[in-house]
Amino acid sequence: MRREGWLIYHRNSLDKKTQEQRDRELAASLTADNIELLPYLPYLVQDIFELGSSPADMEELLRANTDIGPWYRVLDLACGKGAVSLYLAAKFGCSVKGVDFMRDFVDEANRHSTEKFLDRLCVFEWQDANISVESERGYDLVILGAAGNILGNLNQTIHKLRQTVRRGGYILIDDAYSTDHERTPYHTWQNWLDAFSNNNVKYVAHKTFAGDKLEQINFTNQQMIIRRAEELKHQHPELTELFDNYVYSQQNEIDELEGDLIPLTWLLVKE
């Protein structure tokens, strides 16, 4: 599952076109084609804590290639339920600020933070990642996990992330590249490398996420979504088609991820 956890922040300050555009992008980030699904998305994914990114893969990349420790300040954009933030804080003792504009996700992140006694290290805020990325500065590490195009196109995304970290600071991006660009809208490996070069960030390492582990996680998550969709169909029979379409779109994305797409996490450094 891919996701970006934000809704419209300060709606009164946005014109109708911008509101609708951002709502569509949020829905798409959770593999939903219809913005009517937005109120139901937290229910549909309530059983899934790690919404796309692998915290363990990020730990491995950071441990092998950086000096991360308690002295690190980390920004986790579109942090979802806080899975990555909480994991890294527990492993390295670093301080993490997570922002997301799915209110239910932020509430859950704060609850987990308290339960795990990590609330002195982790702060979670209900905020639009587009606003945070324009104001947050000086971090040692910024993370954009399974968040797609919420910050714009590929070059815009890299540029905006680069602004949030100090010189020599790191960037983690969980995404995917396509082995057959003719069949998918995803970027190729070379597209990614060109974007890094264009924005003065250096590729350090990457870790792919594929094989049996990916298939098992996808299958388990899809079964949980199907169960919640069936519950919603009983509660709202008039919206049966809406929920069925969501399940269908989720399966389509799984098929892509297990086909021509290679999910991976990039580790970059700001030059």
Image (cartoon, helix red, strand yellow):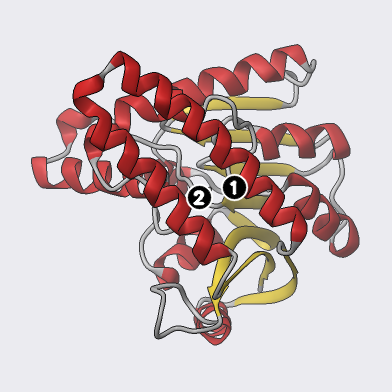
Q: Give how far across and how far down residue 162 sits, in percent.
A: 55, 62
Where is the C terminus found, in terms of image quarters?
A: bottom right
- In the image, what residue occupies the spot 45% across and 44% down? 4
Side (left or right) of 35 relative to 16: right
Q: Secondary structure at mark 2?
A: loop
- In the image, what residue occupies the spot 68% across and 19% down? 112
Q: Amino acid at mark 2?
A: Arg
Q: Which residue is mark 1?
A: 52
Quarter-of-image position of residue 157: bottom left
Q: Give how far across and how far down residue 219 sits, in percent.
A: 62, 46
Q: Residues within 10 Å of mark 1 (few under 14, many from 20)?
A: many
Residues at badges 1 and 2 in contact (C-beta under 8 Å)?
Answer: yes
* Residue 124 in sight in this render: yes
In the image, farthest residue toward the left: 16
Above or below, comparing residue 233 to residue 8 in the picture: above
Question: Reading the chain from its start, which is encountered first: label 1 or label 2?
Answer: 2
- In the image, what residue occupies the spot 84% across and 50% down? 68
Q: Which residue is mark 2?
A: 2
Side (left or right) of 138 relative to 209: left
Q: Nearer the viewer, residue 234 or 128?
A: 234
Q: Amino acid at mark 1?
A: Gly
Q: Give how far across and how far down residue 213 sits, in percent.
A: 76, 54
* Residue 8 in sight in this render: no
- In the image, what residue occupies the spot 61% across and 58% down? 174
* Distance (Cα) linking label 1 and label 2: 5 Å
Quarter-of-image position of residue 92: top right
Q: Secondary structure at mark 1?
A: loop
Side (left or right) of 242 relative to 182: left
Tag count: 2
Which dot marks residue 62? Answer: none
Q: Give how far across and how far down residue 205 sits, in percent.
A: 76, 72
